Amino acid sequence: MLKIHYGFDKFRPGQEEAIDAILDGKDVLVVMPTGGGKSLIYQLPALVLDGVAIVVSPLIALMKDQVDSLNRIGIPATFINSSITPDEAKERMGLVKKEFYKILYIAPERFYNDEFVAALAEVNVKLFAVDEAHCISQWGHDFRPSYLYLSKAIELCGRPPIAALTATATPEVKEDIVKQLAMTNLMKVIIGFARPNLQFGVVRGNDAQKLQMIVDTVSGLSDKCGIIYSGTRAKAEEITDRLLVAGMQAVFYHAGMDPESRSWTQENFLQGKIRVIVATNAFGLGIDKKDVRFVIHHDMPGTIEAYYQEAGRAGRDGQPSLCLLFFAPKDRFLREFFIKGDNPAPETVIEVYENLKNYETERIFTTYAEIIEGLSDKVPDMAVGTCLKILEKEGYISRSSEKTSSAYLRFINNHQITLDFVSKKAKKQVEILNKLQTRFARELFEGWEFDLEEVAGILEVEREALVRSINAWKKAELVEYNPPKRGTEIRMLKRVSREDIKIDFSALREKASRAYKKLDEMEGYVYFFGCRPQYIMNYFGEDDVKPCGQCDNCLSGNKGLRIKKEEGQEITNSAGYKKRFYSKKQKETDFDEIKIEKKTLSTKLTQLETLELFTKGKNIEEIARTRELVVGTVVEHLRFLVEKGLIKNIDKLVDKKKQEKIMAAIKRVGAEKLTPIKEVLGEEISFDEIKLVRATIKR
Ligand SMILES: [Zn+2]
């Protein structure tokens, strides 16, 4: 069967065990790296079992391709998602019932649809496969509330065997998948994550250095294609500009682009027409390009899972590829900003709900900006999104996907007066005004809600021209106009008083603290001095991994965090590592990079040694004496550690009363310069103390 349909002679590691278990009626949890052949694990049993396999996948954009390629090799499969009409969905469901199709791909949101759920009850489901199963876990990096409905959906299907598949899972996420899906009689198939062809490295630098290093690295890899990840959209565009100026071909990609540009970029990258993509983490899910030779991170990601997933897009063909992470201590702030947006305060969640209750209708159309306006504290957009997500998950509201509301237009004066106002020279405006008058005179006089796109089509003018004209009239106070807005339609499901709101905030607090823990572990990777793949594998629960021999630390001879200078061990730079990767194209610029790295490594070590002594309870003078450093240097280390958040509490360093005084002074004169602060405070407080307190607000 494997040969007939797929043309393979042999199974890849793990596939056969998993398939046998499914055919035995067991539940299976499959953890396999991307490209390991996960989909075969549910596709083959689906062919053999008499009945239908349901495959839940969040990757709507990929469903059509998956189904097409199955059909090409003679496997009857179909999909139902938001890209097809309700009639088509109905028709396909009918054919699924008749078992005309053996595999049905659906998006998890489909289970919100009552009609679909009712139809499902009549389908003979013999296997329920959950792809990207880590999305069910709140402790994962890609949680999707719709996945929580799956255990109910499985019951509805008559509780067939479950196959849960994922490419990333820490021990706790694995546990969570099993628990949430209520898997029993379980077989776990876990294939190692190590990717021996990937060469890992970390380089520290400030923003300017990072940009330069990216330009140098990319130009050193002249004809190879790769992905550069950046923490923000603005940065992605900036990096792209720099690469273009330096004469390299690069294109950016982020969620703020319109869908056509995004798929154009994606397509051209897949076909090898674009060499370098600079993207936010919106790029890559489901992208399967084999010959990506490098993945560079401009900023530190928030979790090891995210990092390994993104870096793992390099070298899918097994050929040597480079995974380079640039970082600056302040990268942590960006991540903390995201964590805060992802974990709003309980009061904010309640306040958002209370404000929604003020609307009298059950269906509310609103924008994040409007919701923020109603809050007592300013919060970022992202936090509003999270509040709504929480309220939805807890059953207080439901949301439909984002929508654009109608525009509203009303003419204040009669047609002739308006026409007289509009300059005769503005021919286009006159044309549009007359066309509007001919078609929609009554509506325009009474006030009219309409769709810009549609009306532009009817009038046979460009949408932009229509909008420009209306805006000009609005400016001249000839019309009343509200442009369409993008927003969310919310449905109130429950109206309860404030005291009766039952949301498990302790779970939310735990989620936040886990996010910080994951961030710490990511940061641990950056500051780690042992073998990098080993660190990552340990994180994923694999303990018996040998040093890779090719990451920056392996090549520089570092054997672990506890290297001491006294042991006479020289910390070398990563020249060997660089040389190896650049061996074919050694450029002069590479030597600059090596210098930067050398400095980086020694700085990293010295500050961590200070941290170790500090956590042992030593004070500044004692640390200076032990380390044979001047006090000023130790203070600099501590300032750095405080700024980075590695030292949270500075009470042992600066007396509490003094801290308060310094903060008050900063409030008065600002934190930019030390001298004005010192002038306010006088002799009693030292520059060092000011520096340390100031560091707490910088973190
Ligand atoms: Zn290594």
Image: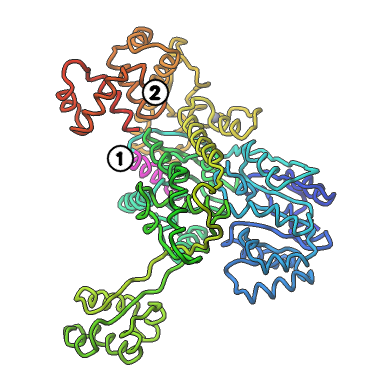
In front of the other: 412 or 254: 412
- 489 up-or-down from 223: above or below: below
Measured from the top left, where is residue 328 in percent x and y?
37, 35
Say which mark, if any, is on residue 628.
none
Q: CA distance from mark 2 to mark 1?
A: 31 Å
Instruction: Classify residue 633 by image quadrant.
Output: top left
Q: Which residues are magenta?
A: 210-229
- 347 up-or-down from 89: above or below: above
- 176 up-or-down from 484: above or below: above
| Quadrant assignment for the N terminus | bottom right
Residue occupying the point 35% across, 46% down: 377
Name the secondary structure under disc 1: helix
Measured from the top left, where is residue 341 in percent x and y?
43, 45
Please check the rendered image and state whether residue 228 is part of the magenta-colored stretch, yes or no: yes
In front of the other: 239 or 360: 360
User: Ligand 1 sits in which quadrant?
Assistant: top right
Residue occupying the point 32% across, 78% down: 409
| Residue under pointer 2 | 649
Q: Is residue 465 visible?
A: yes
Measured from the top left, where is residue 266 in percent x and y?
49, 59
| Residue under pointer 1 | 208
Taking the image as shown, residue 527 lies to the left or right of residue 52, namely: left
